[in-house]
């Protein structure tokens, strides 16, 4: 008996370049280091993920870039001087887990860096001046568990927020002491699924606030401030995304994973969407305005560990006012236009707030001046790629434990589709769009063509996706895979001209036909030109007419009472076929180990993986061997020496 | 390769490898573990789709490096083409034809037992070897590979038990299991029973550690199902 040995085959080759519509991205390596020996390959360095923080100091000479990353027990800070790190720290008995530069107080020769540790402590250092070193939670009186995420409060000189795996979030003021006794707390504010406490002491001390989020002991995996600084998105192991107004501490909305914990979170550069990734292998897009899940992205083969928008490739609609906002209010439309004007800091216009919140966001913005999202400080040429396109198109990146990088183009017309009504037959009425026999008749006859195409190309399920886009290409499945990027991107450009109403209806028909390839329901419901498809249970089965009637009964049988979570089928957690399913623009295996970091920069993006390797990928046309590339290689070299 | 996959998936073995006598009296084992797989085959000649239902007591999935159990389950339901030696006998065409086939879950069992096929026959070695790929599994699960007519396809499962094979090969080693009981994770190792500190550690330790790489079988219980099913776990752990 033979076995299908899928592992370790040729398909697992690492990619060192890939093509998108804007050009070719290349891994920056020196050949002799590009495939380091795996001899020193260790898992003994602890499980802390390698994270990367960037800062650009206001250095007139233009050499202000600094990078910080942790690996095992070590923490490195590098600058343009390639010979040695600016600062290197090795810790005993604990591992650094996360870090953040303060972009408000930084000067050309000083910067505050807060570092969180696996044993709960927090350190404040200045890796450039080296005078500063303060410890918080040193005796672990405040929290004993791992620091999972640490961030300076946007616009603040001295406040930082720290999350722990205990499910608590603390606000520290770097100037205040932590006290010699465990803090006593008193309730300050309470809401659905969270409670906030203050310290009950005579003199002010750290922590200023304690947020308890979710059920007891449920790890907070990451949090992120909105670009405007007014809102805070928190994801945790209980599978919830919670979005708060930071100053008023009110819960504005939440979402639930399809299953499992949410692991990572980020905001779109304009603050309109929150994207989360998790243990359901999905990338989930949540609309801030509508307070609901508007799309899910399926492409990863394992848990999604980082999601990040690429602000330089994200493009905003030029005439957004002509586009119909479903469920949006008027003030929202102003926002993309501002973006289009190429303001130096696109992230600061967060006009979406309602009523009371505007005040605070304005005040914070005034202090923000260049802080906020590291990646977007130097936005200049980035959004030129797509200027010809009418619809707003977000570029999202994600990396996961599957060692793959996925890039996603998310157009707003997809995100604006109303929930359910279009996608699903619901309730008593029965036959909705998909069940409709008319559509099915067409499908049945059309299925033949698509189907044969599939059969010639072999049975690999992934290829089903491709068949519609590439109908004329008689190529092997392997070749197809390579071609997809190119073709999809071309289509992409062309189709963007559709205004939203056309954009929604026309492709959905195409894609219903596409789904007939008998392909896997979720995988194969057709690569729609915009990398989006509806996981239509009915559509994908093609000629099997029975299914339409089955489907009706199945739907009506389902009630919310069946599910104790009670969230399935709601805006917080739509059923899988109730919400558009995005497909990645590209999906590439780029590492041997789990990927743990992804940062988009103006001329490159940077990825890191669990075994300590940090890779720089040059953007198309940017073959600059910038400093990061070189010193990472130096770093690798040191590591190897270290291990011998 | 597709042919092989076909062979293994057309004859899903019963949990114990036993073939039940025709129409056995339903027992509590059936109530708890039995689900239905529907196998849909489309003849490439006449386009006729035929489907056949089969009972299952566990799903045996192939493992792949750095994937999740979710992905392995999706692969389980990938469409395969039956061709060359492995053609499909189409009743409509009355001949052997090329066909496409996939298996999806039609009836979701109360307790879903997943068997990771870590013992693989490697032709080049002429023997079975153990595949130690890292496969992560979440503490809850929904199925992506349900059929269109599945009842309650959004059913949410909670992880309740894991069976682990310790050892380097299929011919030796030791089985242990980790079982959730009253909110605690208990490690059963022969007569030793240890408390796994807490749920967070379970989430942290098990998927991340070598344990997950050797995990052979996972039991997911449907949320809201009777907890009495838990007692069964101990007995079933020997299935590995």
Image (cartoon, coloured by chain):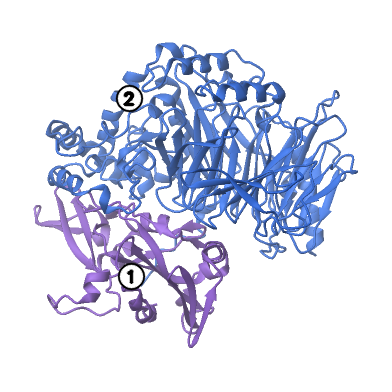
Identify the residue under disc 2: A504
Residue A152 in the image, given as x and y percentages of width and height: 70, 38
Residue at coordinates 32% horizontally, 19% vertically from top-left?
A501
Which circle marks residue A425 in the picture?
none
- The colour applied to the residues of chain B in this rendering is purple
Residue B59 in the image, given as x and y percentages of width and height: 32, 66
Q: How many marks?
A: 2
Residue at coordinates 10% horizontally, 52% vertically from top-left?
B93
The answer to whether A281 is drawn above or below residue B55 in the figure is: above
Quarter holding the N terminus of chain A is bottom left
Quarter holding the C terminus of chain A is bottom right
Q: What chain does mark 2 sit on? A: A
Quick check: A159 left or right of A359? right
Q: CA distance from mark 2 to mark 1?
A: 46 Å
As drawn, the chain in blue is A
Nearer mark to the viewer, of 2 and 1: 1
Is the residue under label 1 in contact with that under label 2 (CB below 8 Å)? no
Which residue occupies the extreme front position in the image?
A202
Identify the residue under disc 1: B227
Q: Residues within 10 Å of mark 2 (few under 14, many from 20)?
A: some
Residue A82 in the image, given as x and y percentages of width and height: 84, 41
The quadrant holding residue B239 is bottom left
The answer to whether A371 is drawn above or below residue B194 in the figure is: above
The quadrant holding residue A446 is top left
Q: What chain does mark 1 sit on? A: B
Q: Disc 1 on helix, strand or loop?
A: loop
Quick check: B69 left or right of A203? left
Q: Are marks 2 and 1 on the same chain?
A: no
Q: Is residue A387 visible?
A: no
Q: Residues within 10 Å of mark 1 (few under 14, many from 20)?
A: some
Residue at coordinates 49% horizontally, 69% vertically from top-left?
B131
Q: Is residue A383 visible?
A: yes
């Amino acid at each position: 008996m033979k076995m299908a040995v899928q592992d370790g085959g040729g398909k697992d080759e690492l990619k060192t370049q890939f093509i998108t519509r804007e050009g070719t991205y290349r891994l920056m390596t020196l050949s002799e280091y590009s495939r380091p020996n795996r001899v020193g390959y260790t898992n003994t360095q602890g499980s802390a993920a390698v994270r990367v923080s960037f800062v650009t100091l206001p250095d007139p000479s233009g050499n202000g870039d600094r990078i910080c990353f942790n690996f095992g027990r070590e923490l490195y800070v590098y600058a343009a001087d390639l010979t040695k790190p600016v600062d290197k720290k090795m810790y005993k008995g604990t591992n650094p887990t996360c870090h953040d530069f303060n972009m408000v107080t930084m000067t050309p020769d000083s910067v505050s860096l807060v570092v969180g540790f696996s044993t709960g402590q927090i350190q404040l250092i200045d890796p450039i001046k080296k005078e500063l070193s303060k410890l918080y939670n040193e005796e672990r009186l405040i929290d004993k568990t791992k620091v999972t995420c640490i961030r300076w409060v946007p616009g603040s000189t001295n406040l930082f927020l720290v999350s722990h795996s205990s499910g608590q979030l603390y606000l520290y003021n770097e100037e205040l002491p932590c006290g010699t006794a465990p803090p006593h707390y008193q309730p300050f504010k309470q809401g659905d699924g969270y409670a906030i406490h203050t310290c009950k002491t005579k003199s002010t001390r750290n922590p200023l606030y304690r947020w308890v989020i979710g059920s007891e002991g449920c790890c907070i995996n990451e949090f992120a401030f909105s670009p405007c600084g007014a809102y805070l998105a928190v994801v945790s192991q209980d599978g919830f995304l919670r979005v708060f107004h930071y100053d008023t501490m009110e819960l504005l909305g939440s979402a639930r994973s399809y299953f499992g914990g949410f692991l990572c979170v980020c905001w779109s550069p304009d603050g309109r969407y929150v994207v989360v990734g998790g243990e359901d292998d999905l990338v989930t897009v949540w609309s801030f305005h509508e307070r609901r899940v508007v799309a899910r992205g399926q492409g990863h083969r394992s848990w999604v560990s980082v999601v990040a928008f690429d602000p330089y490739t994200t493009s905003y609609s030029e005439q957004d006012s002509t586009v119909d906002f479903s469920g949006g209010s008027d003030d929202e439309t102003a926002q993309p236009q501002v973006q289009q004007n190429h303001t130096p800091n696109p992230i600061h216009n967060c006009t979406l707030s309602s009523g009371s919140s505007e005040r605070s966001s304005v005040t914070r913005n005034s202090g923000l001046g260049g802080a906020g999202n590291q990646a977007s400080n130097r936005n200049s040429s980035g959004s030129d790629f797509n200027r010809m396109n009418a619809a707003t198109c977000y570029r999202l990146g994600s990396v996961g434990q599957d060692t793959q990088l996925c890039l996603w183009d998310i157009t707003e017309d997809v995100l604006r589709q109303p929930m359910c009504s279009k996608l699903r037959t619901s309730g008593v009425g029965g036959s909705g769009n998909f069940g409709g026999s008319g559509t099915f008749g067409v499908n049945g006859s059309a299925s033949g063509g698509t189907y044969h195409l599939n059969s010639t190309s072999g049975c690999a399920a992934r290829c089903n996706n491709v068949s519609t886009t590439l109908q004329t290409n008689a190529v092997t499945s392997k070749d197809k895979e390579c071609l997809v990027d190119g073709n999809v991107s071309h289509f992409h450009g062309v189709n963007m001209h559709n205004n939203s109403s056309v954009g929604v209806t026309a492709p959905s028909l195409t894609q219903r036909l596409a789904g007939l390839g008998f392909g896997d329901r979720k995988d194969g419901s057709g690569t729609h030109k915009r990398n989006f498809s509806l996981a239509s249970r009915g559509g994908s089965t093609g000629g099997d007419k029975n299914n339409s009637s089955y489907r009706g009964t199945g739907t009506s049988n389902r009630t919310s009472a069946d599910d104790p979570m009670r969230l399935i089928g709601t805006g917080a957690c739509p059923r899988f076929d109730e919400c558009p399913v995005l497909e990645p623009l590209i999906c590439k295996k780029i590492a041997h180990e789990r990927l743990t970091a992804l940062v988009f920069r103006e001329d490159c993006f940077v990825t890191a993986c669990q075994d300590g390797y940090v890779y720089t990928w040059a953007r198309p046309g940017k073959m600059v061997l910038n400093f990061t590339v070189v010193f990472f290689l130096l770093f690798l070299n040191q590591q190897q020496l270290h291990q011998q | 390769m597709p042919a092989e996959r076909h062979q293994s998936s057309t004859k899903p073995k019963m949990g114990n490898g036993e073939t039940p006598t025709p129409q056995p009296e339903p027992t509590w084992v059936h109530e708890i573990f039995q689900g239905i797989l529907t196998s849909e085959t489309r003849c490439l000649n006449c386009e006729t789709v035929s489907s056949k239902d089969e009972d299952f007591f566990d799903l045996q999935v192939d493992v792949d490096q750095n994937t999740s159990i979710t992905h392995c389950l999706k692969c389980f339901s990938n469409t395969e083409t039956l061709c060359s030696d492995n053609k499909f006998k189409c009743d409509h065409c009355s001949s052997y034809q090329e066909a496409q086939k996939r298996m999806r879950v039609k009836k979701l069992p109360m307790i879903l037992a997943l068997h990771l096929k870590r013992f693989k026959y490697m032709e080049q070695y002429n023997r079975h070897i153990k595949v130690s790929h890292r496969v992560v599994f979440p503490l809850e699960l929904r199925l992506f590979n349900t059929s269109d007519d599945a009842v309650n396809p959004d059913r949410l499962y909670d992880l309740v038990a894991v069976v682990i094979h310790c050892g380097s090969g299929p011919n030796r080693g030791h089985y242990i299991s980790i079982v959730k009981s009253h909110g605690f994770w208990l490690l059963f190792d022969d007569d030793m029973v240890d408390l796994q500190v807490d749920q967070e550690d379970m989430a942290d330790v098990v998927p991340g550690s070598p344990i997950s790489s050797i995990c052979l079988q996972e039991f997911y219980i449907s949320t809201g199902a009777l907890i009495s099913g838990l007692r069964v776990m101990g007995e079933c752990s020997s299935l590995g």
